Amino acid sequence: MSELPRQDLVARARVFSVRLLKVCEGLFRDPGCSRRFVENLAAAGTAIGQNLSEAQSSMSRRQMAQCYRVALRESREARHSLQIVHDLHKGDASEVAWLAGEANEFIAMLVTSVRRLDEPADRDGSLR
């Protein structure tokens, strides 16, 4: 999916957001797409990176997990909307497919991250 390392989620989310916003620009011009729908897609897609960025400055594991949970919800919302765009044959099909695939990868990574953050930490703060 992405050429960026898996570990750099914020940079990956930024690339995702830029590509998503370019697709949204085209959807705004399409009379068959609701403006509200496109705005919601753009908001969900860009919120992934915003929440991942916020997680970087979290003060606790609990706070980081909460930021990741929000990013996970936004990833699922963006994926759902992208599936609708695909089903309606709107936008550049290959770009929409890439975005949906990247949203799937965010979901997989965030599910794993949230599960790990929810595990009890050892006394030194590391995961078991």
Image (spheres, rainbow, N blue to C red):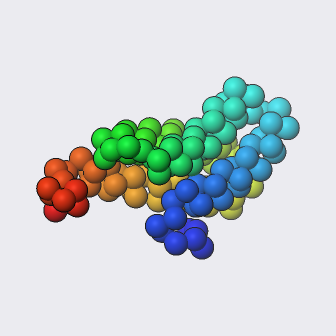
On the rendered image, what quadrant is the C terminus found in?
Answer: bottom left
Looking at this rendering, what residue extends furthest in the right direction? 29
Q: Position of residue 9 (x, y in %)?
A: 51, 59
- Residue at 19 percent across and 59 percent down: it is 124
Relative to 16, does residue 30 appear above or below in the rendering? above
Q: Is residue 26 visible?
A: yes
Q: Is residue 9 left or right of residue 22?
A: left
Q: Is residue 76 visible?
A: no
Q: Residue 121, located in which quarter of the rendered image? A: bottom left
Q: Position of residue 24 (x, y in %)?
A: 74, 43
- Residue at 62 percent across and 43 percent down: it is 46
- Residue at 39 percent across and 52 percent down: it is 110
- Residue at 69 percent across and 32 percent down: it is 39
Residue in the foreground of this view, choosing between 88 and 39? 39
Residue in the foreground of this view, choosing between 79 and 59? 59
Q: Is residue 127 left or right of residue 107?
A: left
Q: How many marks?
A: 0
Relative to 35, does residue 58 appear above or below in the rendering? below
Q: Is residue 49 left or right of residue 18?
A: left
Q: Position of residue 117 (x, y in %)?
A: 28, 51
Q: Position of residue 16 (x, y in %)?
A: 63, 55
On the rendered image, what quadrant is the N terminus found in?
Answer: bottom right
